[in-house]
Amino acid sequence: MRQNNRNPFQAMALMSAIVSQLVGSILIGIFAGRWLDRHWGTEPIFLIIGLLLGLAAGTFSMLLSIRHFYSGDK
């Protein structure tokens, strides 16, 4: 049986890592999409694509962080 000896600060660190990864990747996708739209003159297309790619990258990164957090159980 596994014991739950996690410190509350570890849970706060995980939550802040998840939030920063999600927000950061979404913002990078949005700004990259806006830059491409301005560069090529295609107004909403790359913004939407960048938003979706940023959301997918943030979700994938979040899942990897959670997997890494729970693989360290002793």
Image: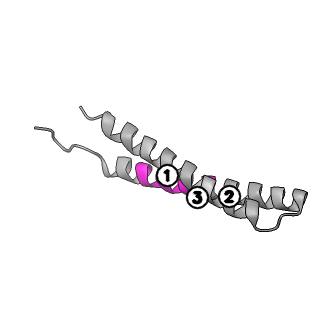
Q: Label 3: few (<14), some or many (≥20) within 10 Å?
A: some
In primary-sequence order, the first of circles 3 and 1 is: 3
In the picture, which quadrant includes the N terminus? top left
Would you name the residue on which mark 3 appears? 23
Q: Residues within 10 Å of mark 2 (few under 14, many from 20)?
A: some
Contact (Cβ within 8 Å) of mark 2 with mark 3: no
Residue 65: x %, y % from top left: 44, 43
Crowd band around label 1 with a 10 angstrom C-alpha radius: few (<14), some (14–19), many (20+): some
Position of 32 relative to 71 (above/below): below
Separation of residues labelled 1 and 2 (CA atoms): 15 Å
9 falls in the magenta region? no
Let me know if residue 14 appears in the view. yes
Identify the amino acid type marked 2: Ile
Judged left or right of residue 11, residue 42 is right
Q: Which mark is residue 59?
A: 1
Viewer-side label of 3, 1: 1
Tell me the residue at 43%/46% (across/down).
63
- State the residue position of label 2: 49
Q: Magenta span covers which residues?
A: 13-25
Above or below, comparing residue 9 to residue 68 in the picture: below
Identity of the residue drawn at 68% across and 63% down: 48
Q: Nearer the viewer, mark 2 or mark 3?
A: 2
